[in-house]
Image (cartoon, grey):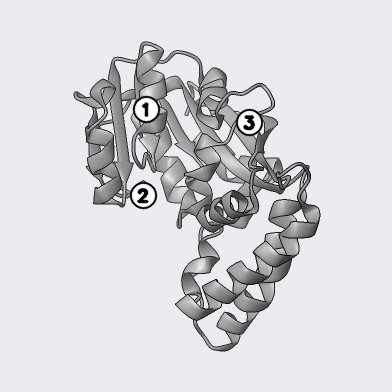
Amino acid sequence: MGVAASPTAKGRTSYEEFADRVGTPERVLDLGCADGALLEVFAGRGATTLAGIDLSGAELALARQRPALVKADVRVGRAQELPFEDSAFDAVVSHMALMLMTDVEQVVAEAARVLVPGGVLAVALGGGAVDGEGMELFLKLARPYFEAARAAERVMPRLGNRAIRTREGLDEVLTPAGFAPVSWDSIVLDQGGTPEKVWETNMSVFYDVTVLDEDQLAELRREFLDAARSLVLDGRLACGMRINFATTHRESSA
């Protein structure tokens, strides 16, 4: 995924930065673990019990191919109905996935259930375009296509609860489930490169493109690459994305 692979100004990945905020838990559950790249980071930091759920069997097959995850318990499943025992984990993490989930209150309740008292919940959330024209240009050109798709009733179901993309909105969901107020900070990922690379990155970030047909995607790509030419400096189109990190813990009295 473009977000996971894009470096920060320090040359580190979003996964590495995210794991720094979680610490070194022994037992980690990843909600929306995809190909297991984040779990692999925790394995490298000493975690001995690794588990993950995802809706994609194909992504989980890739996770199982990672040597560090040979003993990991990765399963097809829903975060709203976790197939794990109470107090089974020291940390529950979710990188760019919680914000796409439905019934987020149930997800949070399940996370609280499987965490030990004092256990860490950490989530990474998309914070939008920053420090570069590439993503802003893509959105400017893509919006008319998305609006046309809505008019034709070819609409992708709205993903997740947008309220939790803010600190206040996330706390409103977490507090009733027994979590402390979140700690909140941000990083900026450098997603710049050739216009073609920036196009591919934006295609991986914005799920709305799935409602566009082949001809629309081809036309949007042509428009983007044509418009990007005037923004390229030294062969590179600037493009940045903010990622917000929120961390909290399950309070002992919950």
Left or right: where 127 falls relative to 208: right
- Inspect the image, locate mark 1, and give the three-letter code of the amino acid beneath it: Leu
Q: Which residue is mark 1?
A: 39
Cα separation between marks 1 and 3: 22 Å
Instruction: Name the residue located 61 percent from the left edge and 48 percent from the top edge.
Output: 164
Residue nearer the viewer, 196 or 116? 196
- Inspect the image, locate mark 3, and give the three-letter code of the amino acid beneath it: Val
Q: Residue furthest left?
A: 71
Q: Is residue 167 above or below residue 184?
A: below
Q: Which residue is mark 3?
A: 182
Residue nearer the viewer, 136 or 15? 136
- Inspect the image, locate mark 2, and give the three-letter code of the amino acid beneath it: Gln
**For the residue labelled by badge 2, is the local secondary structure a helix, a strand or a loop?**
loop
Q: Which residue is mark 2?
A: 80
The location of residue 90, given as percent across then percent down, is 39, 20
Label 3 neighbour load within 10 Å: few <14, some 14-19, many 20+: many
Mark 2 or mark 1, whichever is nearer to me:
1
